[in-house]
Image: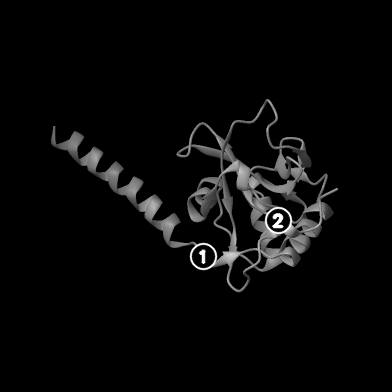
Amino acid sequence: MKKFIKTIAASALVFVGFFAFNAGSTTSASAATKSDFTSIYKVAKAHLGASYVYGATGPTAFDCSGFTGYIYKKGASVTLPRTAQAQYNAYKHVSYKNIKKGDLVFFGGSAYSISHVGMYIGKGKMIDAQNRGVVREAVHAPWWHAVGYARVTTADNSNAASSATDAD
C-alpha cells in the first residue's frame, strides 16, 4: 500500500511540475501588430512545402509547434513555448469570431490534450506543418477538431494583427 501511495504522489508531482514549468516560460504583453503579422507570414510562406519531421524546429523540416515557434522567432523575435500544449497554455484565448491574423489555432481532443497547432492567416485558413509538410489549409477541415484559439503577444507592440493585408 505504501508503494502505491508513493507512486501516486510521485506521479502527481511530475504532473504539477510539468504545468508549472510550462506556465512559467511564457511572455505576455500586447498583441502582434500588422507589421509583425506581415513579417511572420512572409517567413511562413517561404517555408511552404518544407517537410514534416516529428520534433523538428526548422529551417528545412518542422513539426507543428516547431513551425509556429520558428516563424514567430524569425518574423517577430518572439519565443514561443516548444510544444503545442504549452503554446495553448501560454497565451490569452479568443473565440473564433474574434480570431485575428497571426493568432494560433489549436486542435486535439480537449484543452488538456492539444495535439496540433497552426497560425491563422485570414479567410478561414491557416498555415501549419503536418504530415503533408508545411501547407495552407482550412481551419475547419473535417480531419481537424479545433479546440481553441490564442492571441500571441509581443513585448513592445499594441496594434491587433487583424488589420494586416489579407493572406493569399
Rendered image coloring scheme: one colour
Taking the spot 73% from the left edge, 60% from the top edge, the residue there is: 37
Mark 2 near mark 1, Cβ–Cβ under 8 Å? no
Mark 1 residue type:
Ser
SS of the residue under disc 1: loop
Residue situated in front as seen by the camera: 85 or 39: 39
Residue 157 is marked as: none
Residue 16 left/right relative to 166 = left
**Residue 4, image x, y percentages:** 20, 34
Residue 160 left/right relative to 132 = left
**Residue 99, image x, y percentages:** 64, 48
- Position of residue 27 relative to residue 129, above or below, is below
Residue 155 left/right relative to 168 = left
Mark 2 residue type:
Ser
**Residue 120, image x, y percentages:** 69, 47
SS of the residue under disc 2: helix
The residue carrying mark 2 is 162
Taking the spot 56% from the left edge, 44% from the top edge, the residue there is: 95
- Position of residue 28 relative to residue 16, above or below, is below
**In which image quadrant can residue 11 be found?**
top left
**In which image quadrant can residue 115 be found?**
top right
**Residue 88, image x, y percentages:** 52, 48
Q: Residue furthest bottom?
A: 156
Taking the spot 53% from the left edge, 39% from the top edge, the residue there is: 114
Residue situated in front as seen by the camera: 114 or 82: 114
Q: Residues within 10 Å of mark 2 (few under 14, many from 20)?
A: some
Separation (CA) of disc 2 from disc 1: 19 Å
The quarter of the rendered structure image containing the N terminus is top left
The residue carrying mark 1 is 28
Residue situated in front as seen by the camera: 161 or 67: 161
